[in-house]
Amino acid sequence: MKEKNRECYFDKETTAIIKGILLILMFILHFFCFPSWYVKGIEYPKLSWLENFQGHFQICIAGFTFLTGYLYYFTKQKNFEYVVKKWKDILIPYWFVFGLLFLIAYLTNTYSGNIKTFVLEIFALERPVMFFCWYVSYYLIMIFVLWLLVHFIKNDLVKWLVALLGAYILYWACVHFIHIDYVVSTMEKFSVYFPMTVMGYLCSKRKWFENLEKLMQRKTIVCSVLLIVMVFMEPSWLYAIKIDNILFEMIRKCVRIMSIPLFVYGLIEIMKRMHSKVLKDVLNTVGGGHSMLMWFIHGIFFNCSKEIFQKVLYLPKNPVLVLMWGLALCWGISIVLDLVLKPIMKKKGQYNVSEKNY
């Protein structure tokens, strides 16, 4: 059982800062690591070498889903009403941005879908408009299954095995028996990231961060930097071993899952000891107030309307300036949208849209 009055290892500000870092990693991943997403005829920063780091920067997604599991442990009411509430927390902003971007695509005659794709995209199962929406459909399933797992399975080892093997078996069954692309794709993501969510929950319950802090003692900063570098570069050495079979792939997967807490812990410890108020404020602004809306909005640079909006994103030719410009654009737009969404969310009895569901 959860101890009475036990506090989370890191505070709300640190949570926002970590999310800010993860969001920046996500923007780097999407802005520079997929040359196939570029529109022909636009001049882009010459960073083709970053294509080799797609797997490295995808740690941002693992970090978000890990934090969801970690913070779920501290939720006071772990009931189905909470699940429904979290569904609304993410779906209302999603539908709002979807409606806006769909209207833009329709008015600019760039919408590439049909009635079927429109209906599926309402539940984030297709993505001509909401290009990075797959996490929404994953989240809707994940938060429900996490509640089931915590509610009905008391043994932590069984929780872990069900999350790891159950998710993979479910994906395998979809591949071999269902043959519906969007179902298979969603279950593939679920098999990859749900075990990381459960790892976050168990990490919180078992006080792994607290124990790591005791283990490292005074060498926390040095060890944290080493952990971050080691885990970030993990795909390089993990896939350098040229063994391709199901058993070794599961070993790779388990190593990846087990390493995520080390990466997040390293970020937390460095941020807790950082003295730069300006940097903290910037990361807090990115990750705290509007990160969900920024995540939704930045898809417009790569969706069916990308031929219009990539010209805006890549106006600067320096990659650092592109990143800063993209963050500033999405942040500014999210502020305006938040003014509209706040009354809606309050009327529906939801959290402020600023409260994240990652």
Image: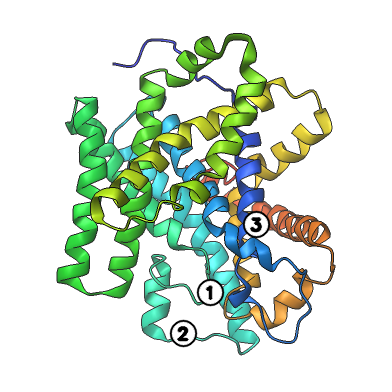
Q: Position of residue 129 (x, y in %)?
A: 53, 74
Label 1 sits on what residue type? Val
91 relative to 284, above or below: below
Quadrant hosting residue 144? top left
Q: Position of residue 130 (x, y in %)?
A: 52, 69
Question: How far is the residue under mark 2 from the one under mark 1?
Answer: 8 Å
Label 3 sits on what residue type? Phe
What residue is disc 3 on? Answer: 27
Callouts 2 and 1 close, C-beta under 8 Å:
yes
Residue lying furthest left: 177
What residue is disc 1 on? Answer: 129
Residue 206 in the figure: left or right of residue 30: left
Q: Is residue 143 visible?
A: no
What residue is disc 2 on? Answer: 113
Precedes in sequence: disc 3 or disc 2:
3
Q: Kindly report which numbered mark, 1 or 3, lies closer to the viewer in this rendering.
A: 3
152 relative to 347, above or below: above
SS class, disc 3: helix
Image point 41% across, 17% down: which residue? 207
Q: Quadrant of the N terminus?
A: top left
